[in-house]
Image (spheres, rainbow, N blue to C red):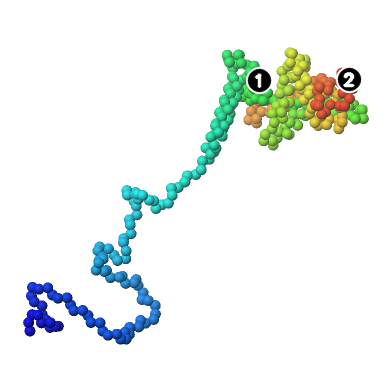
Amino acid sequence: MGAYDEGANARPVAGEPSEAPPATTVPAAGPLPARASTPAGPPPAGPPPADPPSAGHPTVGRSAAGPPPADPPSADHPTVGHSTAGPPPVGPPPAGVAALSLPFQIAAALAFALVAVVACAHLGMVFLHVAPSNTVTKQHGQAIDEWIYPEFEQNWKLFAPNPLQQNIAVQVRAEVKSVDGAVRTTRWYDLSALDGRVIDGNLLPSHTQQNELRRAWDFFAATHDNANRPNGLRGDLSERYLRRIAVLRLDREEAGGRGAVIQQVQVRSRTTNVPPPEWSEEQVSDKPVLRQLPWWPVADTDRAAGTRPVDSTETAASAR
């Protein structure tokens, strides 16, 4: 048979391309062969088998499970273009003066500056008041006294070389006219002890409770001699000041009963020495020393507005 023989037994000639394989013959229509049945049951354990790589997309240098995870950003190589940590943290809101608006901040600054100026001025006034006499106090002494007295008066007896070592109690009694017309003399009222009971246990006692009566007696003693005669122009003023305080305190205590009218008062002081400590050899007298003033008639001007009697003419005549 030659080289051009046709059929299944034809042989290719050397050096010539081989012919395409013959087309596959499709069998005639007929029933399809039965498939093998898969037994029912749970799927086998383990990961599903990976799809085999296709001829067009071979797997090169990586696993079939997917691309490798990306490395997390480091401090040397931060992530550019996006952030995986979320929005940046928000700081705490401003507090105090910084939380106010600009007009209120200006007002607060002006208030603080005013308080600082007043505090500095007050400290300067107090310093000039307690300092020795100098050029400033000689030229502006009246202005300094008007600022200091009476609220900011300084008493340095505690720090003096010879501090006060006596207890002085101011006492008063009165001659009153009761509602039925009877005139009698009351007992002695210890005004200093009354102030002491009010001050004890009081965290914020008033200036009046602490110093009014004490300063009134010091004022009287400084303007009178040992015979209780005034030694200057301020003697009469100190008498009227002490008498008004005594009348107001007696009216508060309802001396002589409700409705009684005070016609005259008498004031005295009771001075006792402070005992020395046990380790001291100092000897002092423990006997009180009394200084009793004469009777002072009481006028309507010595009474408070709410304690004046109805018939002021009769009271003023009896006071004379």
User: Which residue position is annotated with label 1?
Assistant: 146
Dot 2, crowdedness within 10 Å: few (<14), some or many (≥20)? few
Q: Which of labels 1 and 2 is toward the front? A: 1
Q: Where is 80 relative to 114, above or below?
A: below
Measured as percent of width and height from the top left, residue 22 is found at 18, 79
Question: Which one is nearer the viewer's eye here, 206 or 286?
Answer: 206
Q: Residue at x 61, y 24 (%)?
A: 159
Give coordinates of residue 244: x percent, y percent. Answer: 78, 24
Residue 177, percent across and down?
89, 27
Residue at (89%, 29%) from the top-left corner?
A: 178
Residue 71 seen: yes
Q: 224 or 226: which is nearer to us?
A: 224
Q: How crowded is the residue under tag 1: few (<14 C-alpha within 10 Å), some, or many (20+)?
A: few
Asked if residue 49 lies left or right of residue 269, the reply is left
Residue 295, visible in the rendered structure: no
Residue 128 picture location, percent across and down:
59, 20
Query: Considering only order in the chain, which callout, 2 or 1, is on the residue closer to the N terminus?
Result: 1
Q: Amino acid at mark 2?
A: Ala
Q: Which residue is mark 2?
A: 317
Q: Residue at x 39, y 80 (%)?
A: 41
> Observer-nearest residue: 82 or 26?
26
Q: Amino acid at mark 1?
A: Glu
Say which quarter of the image contains residue 133. Answer: top right
